Amino acid sequence: MPPSLIVHGGAWDIPDDAVEACKIGCQRALEAGWTVLSSGGHAMDAIEAAIMALEDDPVFDAGYGSHLNLDGQVECDAIVMDATTLRAGSVAGLHRIRNPIRLARAVLEMCPHMMLIAEGAERFAAQHGIALCDPENLVSPAEREAWLRCSKDSHAAEHHRGHEQGTVGAVALDVHGRLIAATSTGGTCCKLPGRVGDSPLIGCGCYADAETGGVSSTGYGEAIMKVVLAKTACDFLRPATSTPDRAAQAAVQLLANRGKGTGGVILLDKRGKPGFAFNTPRMAYGYVAADASFITGV
Ligand code: ASP
């Protein structure tokens, strides 16, 4: 089976001056994941490599450089899901994990539960060889500056729009037909401490089912939850007449109509065919085309 990979770096009103950095970030994530997939590696390793590249890039809202919450702290959520087993590993409310995707994977592979939060999740990380970091080390200068600007003006919404991009996600299919999807985020900027969005919720921020495909969502979490966006997009892949792009578009249409929200999805169908859609001004995305060339866009 030919491998396949698609990634995103968030769907928002990405400002002009961040477009190039978002494209480069998606390109790097494709390179990291494709190195694994093209040499016959496991989709889970490809997902971890791709998402870590995005988490480490401060232009994206995940890992280092995440948006700060109202208290001025980074608070991350992440999920990874295996389409074959329908098992997920999900983590939320993390303050001390540099690469939340690594912890989500550890939960999927080594925990009897599928979702851990806050201190309990960080304790599980420490027990499974994932180092805890100083919370300050997750704060980028740009996000601190943006947070200070927001704080000085009672967190007026117009400040948030300028630095809202971008949750990250990826879906990979390997040569053995293993399909994995994942999402990682710092959540919305200046969120209430303790707020958990759609991203780490199975079926909302991410879903993967070998009978349909794998999806990662991004956008306004409170609306995405209403329509269980990722699972809904997977279900839209089920009819024989559906195509990946049409399924993605139908899911985003539902997000707009019933959820009254904005956002986007990336997906691979069960054979690895990519599709995506968004109803925000922009979404950062990248995928590997059938001729193995990398396509990125914002
Ligand atoms: N969906 C994320 C959340 O609400 C934000 C995003 O996708 O940018 O936490």
Image: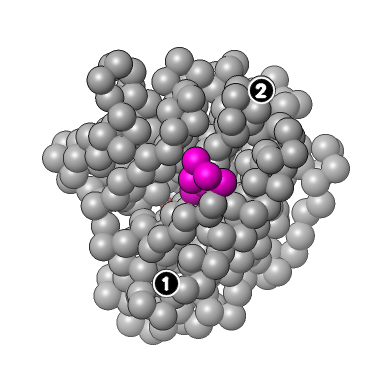
Query: In the displayed structure, does residue 203 sit left or right of residue 76?
Result: left
Q: Which quadrant of the view contains residue 241? A: top left
For the point 75% across and 26% down, the residue is 110
Q: At which x and y percent is residue 255?
A: 23, 40
For the point 84% across and 38% down, the residue is 127
Name the one closer to the observer, 122 or 291: 291
187 is higher (above) or lower (below) than 46: below
Of labels 1 and 2, the one closer to you: 2
Most frequent secondary structure within the magenta stretch: loop
For the point 36% across and 58% down, the residue is 283
The residue carrying mark 1 is 19
For the point 80% across and 46% down, the residue is 130
Region of the chain picked out in magenta, as a range: 287-292
Whether ligand 1 has any atom under 8 Å from the Cβ at mark 1 is answered as no
- 10 Å neighbourhood of mark 2: few (<14), some, or many (≥20)? few
- 10 Å neighbourhood of mark 1: few (<14), some, or many (≥20)? some
| Quadrant of the rendering where the N terminus is positioned | top right
Q: Which quadrant of the view contains residue 231? A: top left
Residue 277 within the magenta-colored segment of the rendering: no
Name the one closer to the observer, 21 or 223: 21
**Can you name the residue that lies furthest to the left here?**
257
**Can you name the residue that lies furthest to the front here?**
291
80 is higher (above) or lower (below) than 92: above
Q: Give the distance between the C-alpha atoms of the residues marked 1 and 2, in whole angstroms.
A: 35 Å
Dot 1 and dot 2 residues touching (CB under 8 Å): no
Q: Which quadrant of the view contains residue 132? A: bottom right
The residue carrying mark 2 is 176
